[in-house]
Amino acid sequence: ILKENKPYFTKNRNCKRIIRAFKESDSDILTTPEIYSLLLDQTNAAGGRLVTHPSMPQVTNNLCKFPFFKKVGIIMGMSKVGNSMKVARWQLTELGEEE
């Protein structure tokens, strides 16, 4: 949808949480598993743990679908079992940084 000659996307709850994870982290570029673990560690305004969390496919779909995030590259990472796998690296765009 074009509005004011630029793409217009509404930020859903998961997008807002992913943007918050980027802003709370120390680095500008994060991998998909790092983003997912930051989402699991997020708390609400009162300091309590959040009850609902997006699944890993939901996080990946939000990162691919919305223009708030940009894929920077792919690196070889390790799974929890020890197998090597390709992992995408993500960065916030200007659309994601503005409130």
Image: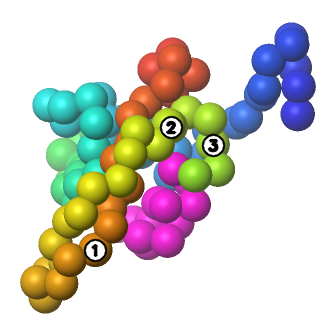
Tag on residue 27? none
Q: Position of residue 84 (x, y in %)?
A: 20, 77
Instruction: Tell me whether circle 2 and circle 3 mark residues in contact (CB < 8 Å).
Output: yes
Residue 5 sits above or below residue 92 on the image: above
Q: Secondary structure at mark 3?
A: loop
Residue 41 position within the rendered picture, expressed as x and y whole percent measured from the top left: 20, 56
Q: Residue at x 52, y 50 (%)?
A: 63
Kindly identify the residue that appears in the image at 27 percent across and 29 percent down.
28
Q: Residues within 10 Å of mark 3 (few under 14, many from 20)?
A: some
Q: Is residue 84 left or right of residue 35?
A: left
Residue 69 marker: 2
From the top left corner, tell me how far across and down residue 36 is, in percent. Answer: 31, 60
Q: Which mark is residue 66?
A: 3
* Mark 1 vs 2, N-terminal side: 2
User: For mark 1, what is the residue?
Assistant: 85
Judging depth in this view, the residue of 37 and 83 nearest the camera is 83
Q: Residues within 10 Å of mark 1 (few under 14, many from 20)?
A: few
The segment highlighted magenta reads 49-63
CA gap, disc 1 to disc 3?
Answer: 24 Å
